[in-house]
Image (tube, rainbow, N blue to C red):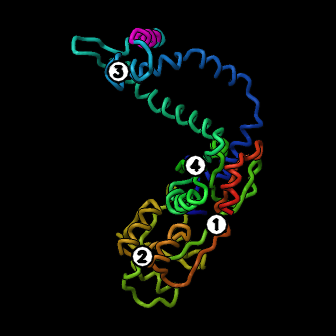
Amino acid sequence: MGVCHTGMAGGLSFEASLAQNNQQTFTHHPPRIYLLITKLKRLPPIHALSAFEAVARHGSFSSAAEELHLSQSAVSKQVRTLEEHTRSPVFRRHARGIELTSTGTALLQEIQPALAQLSSGIERIRQRHDANTVNVIATHAVSHYWLFPKVIAFNREHPDITVSIQSDNAITPAVINEYDFGIVFGSGGWPGLDVQPLFAERVYPVCRSDLELPELQTLADLKELPLIELDSSAWDCIDWVDWFAHFNEEYTPRPHSLKFNQVSLSYRAALEGLGVSLGWDFMVAQAISEGRLRRVGEFVYDSGKYDFLVHGIKEPLKPAAQTFKEWLS
């Protein structure tokens, strides 16, 4: 069980996603492939979708044509092609300009995120082949609290190499292969991936440095402090119940306790002096060294798991990526 920074996809751990992915990889479904190809043939051309999206966004054919570096008549032709596929007009033209029809509105809501995702994916692929760009995907907490400060330091030493961070809590094995590296939590040993441990999961109580608390001698004393609760119902994540259970101690949250569903919010509440929070070492170590937080007691939950730097083994790392990997180690 790990902190909420772990790569989760619809409640699946990275290991579960990998197992599911492996099952899908070695299962052959020719009829499904045929069905997919048939559906793709029915889609309108990407140029038509792009032209429609640009016109809808600008509210003008001429502005869309300028953005796309096309003539206005070419943009109009692309929109007509789209309307042939939808069998319904997507714009209503009037003296003051144009407006979306109900079909156009529904279509725009569907294709805008899809086009944005496609554009982002193509850019990542382009960057992967850029000799001096290293792409890394990590969860929000790891990106913010651990990776970003290290990228700043790396950039000072290697100003010719650009490290691009993608922050996402839904990290799956398939997603890893779109990047030079991923940072994922678990036990390691994943087939098809090279793994390098970065830091262990160590969890301990923390509070603001100037927060006045009674003297702590035992875990029973800790239970009496104003503990900031963590709602882990939607995440594979350690909460106070899990933390105390590690020490064979039962714990029941107090009614009306301050509670958050994200580790980062619990961390912020501790910084504000609102109580005692669970602190993941990779998140709180810097604040402790700077005197903004302090540990409460000497009890530490070491889960035995790590965050790993991972990458696919099918292709060799480019020199810039190899430099970054060696620097992190």
Residue depicted at 43% across the width and 69% down the height: 229
Frontmost of labels 4 and 3 is: 4
The residues tagged by marks 3 and 1 sit, at their Cα atoms, a distance apart of 50 Å
The amino acid on which the numbered mark 3 sits, given as a three-letter code, is Ser
Kind of residue sitting beneath label 4: Thr
Side (left or right) of 74 relative to 193: left
Q: Which span of residues is magenta-colored?
A: 72-81
- For the residue labelled by badge 3, is the local secondary structure a helix, a strand or a loop? helix
Q: Tell me the kind of residue under disc 2.
A: Arg
Q: Residue at x 65, y 50 (%)?
A: 181
Residue 274 in percent (x, y) is at 35, 73
Q: Alpha-carbon distance for marks 2 and 1?
A: 22 Å
Residue 180 vs residue 5, the one in the foreground: 180
Q: Earlier in the sequence, mark 3 or mark 2?
A: 3
Residue of label 1: 199
What whole-number distance in Å separates the C-alpha atoms at marks 4 and 1?
23 Å
Q: Residues within 10 Å of mark 2 (few under 14, many from 20)?
A: some
Q: Quadrant of the C terminus?
A: bottom right
Q: Nearer the viewer, residue 45 or 245?
A: 45
- Can residue 73 be found in the magenta stretch? yes
Residue 58 is drawn in which quadrant? Answer: top left
Sequence order check: which comes first, mark 4 or mark 1?
A: 4
Q: Position of residue 163 (x, y in %)?
A: 58, 50
Which secondary structure class fits the magenta region best?
helix
Asked whether the residues under the numbered discs 4 and 3 touch, taking CB atoms below 8 Å apart as contact, a structural biologist would say: no
Q: Which residue is mark 4?
A: 162
Left or right: where does residue 183 sit relative to residue 221? right
